[in-house]
Amino acid sequence: MQEIRVELTKNPKQKPAPGAPLPFGTIFTDHMFIMNYDEGQGWHDPRIVPYGPIEMDPSAMCLHYGQSVFEGMKAYRAQDGRILLFRPDKNMARLNVSNDRLCIPPIDEELAKAAIEKLVSVEKDWVPSEEGTSLYIRPFIIGVDPHIGVHPAHHLLFMVICCPVGAYYPEGLDPVKIYVETNYVRAVRGGMGFTKTAGNYAASLKAQDEAEKQDYTQVLWLDGVERKYIEEVGTMNVFFVIDDEVVTPALQGSILSGITRMSCIEMLKSWGMKVSERRLSIQEVADAAAEGRLKEAFGTGTAAVISPIGHLKWGDDIMEINNGEIGPLSQKLYDTLTGIQWGKIKDEFGWTVEVK
Ligand SMILES: *Cc1c(COP(=O)(O)O)cnc(C)c1O
C-alpha cells in the first residue's frame, strides 16, 4: 500500500466551543486528504495537507459535465473517548460502484479506508463529544482535465474533507411531513440513481425547493417510468411497516443502496421480523393506510439515521401515520443503531471500526 504523507498545518483554527451550534456542513477541520490520478501513473501521491482551496482550470471537466462522485459517513465519539467509524468498508465499496458508472478509475479501497482513518486520527480533537454530535466525513472524486469535451477524465482528484456536525434531532425524534412527488423524477433505471453522483442531487433541488415552500420536509420519489412505485424519500431510503411486514423498495438500479438501509434490514432480520425488499406501489401504501394496516413509515440515512414519517400526502389523499408520532419499531431501530454507532451498546454485528 502507498504511504500517506502528512503535512500538518502551522495555523490551526479555533475549534468550536463545546456545546456551540454546529450547523451541518459549514465548519471544516484543519486538514484534508488528497490523491491524484493521472493517466499512465494511476492513483498516486496520497497525502494529508492543511485544509484550503484547490486550484482548477475553469475548463475542468467536473464543472461542466458533472463527472463527480462522493460518499457520506461519520466518526462518532464514544463515552470512553474512543472514536468509531461505522462500516467504512461499505462506503468504499459503494464509492467504487459509483466510480464504475461514471467512468472513474477505481480506487484502492484499503488505501482509501486507511486515508480516512489517518485523517480522522489527525483531526481527533475535532470529533465533538456532546450527545448526538459527530464528525461528518465527505470523500469525493472529481475529473479535472482542462478540456471542454465530453469524455471520461484522464486526470482526477480524490479528496476527503471533514466537518463537525450537531445532533440531527436536538429535541428527540420528530416525525416529518412528506409529500409524494408526481411531477418531477429523480432517476430512472439505466441512469445513475444507484450512485452518489452530483447530478442526482442537482435533479432533486427543484422538488425539494417546492416541498419546503409548502412546508414539507422532503418528497417521496416515485419510479420515473410508471410513476407508481416507491423509490426513496429525499436523500434517504424508505421503509413502511404494513401489518407485520416491513417493506422497503428493492434495489433495481434507480435507488441508492444505503448502508443504513442495509443495516436496518440485517437488524430487523436478526430480531426475527419479516422484511421484504420488493416493489411497493404508492396505491398499496394508500390502501394499507385507509384500512388501518399502515403502522409506521421512516426514512434511513447516515445524517438522520432514522427519520419517522408522520404525515404523507399523495394528491388529495392525506395519510396520518401512527397519529404523527414515532412508532415503536422506528424508535427501536434508532436506539439500537445509534447505540452501536456511539459505542453505547455492544456491537454484536461487528460494524464499528475504532480509529487509533
Ligand atoms: C446517501 C444516500 C442515501 C442513504 O445512504 P446511507 O449509506 O444510509 O447514508 C439514500 N439515498 C440517497 C439518494 C443518498 O444519497
Image (tube, helix red, strand yellow):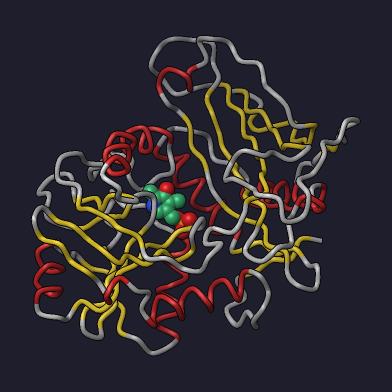
Q: Is residue 170 above or below residue 28?
A: below
Asked whether the viewer can see residue 319, the reply is yes
Residue under the image location 47 percent in, 64 percent down: 260
Q: Is residue 247 above or below residue 170?
A: below
Q: Which quadrant holds residue 248?
A: bottom left
Residue 308 in percent (x, y) is at: 37, 67
Q: Is residue 204 left or right of residue 271?
A: left
Asked whether the viewer can see residue 276, the reply is no
Q: Quadrant of the C terminus?
A: bottom right
Q: Residue furthest bottom?
A: 272
Residue 30 in percent (x, y) is at: 78, 37
- Count of numbered circles in the view: 0
Q: Is residue 162 left or right of residue 30?
A: left
Q: Is residue 50 above or below residue 192?
A: above
Q: Which quadrant holds residue 160?
A: top right
Q: Is residue 73 above or below residue 349?
A: above
Residue under the image location 54 percent in, 54 percent down: 91
Front residue (pair 295, 44): 295
Residue under the image location 61 percent in, 38 percent down: 26
Residue 52 in percent (x, y) is at: 72, 26
Residue 43 in percent (x, y) is at: 65, 33
Q: Which quadrant holds residue 301?
A: bottom left
Residue under the image location 63 percent in, 45 percent down: 108
Front residue (pair 112, 317): 317
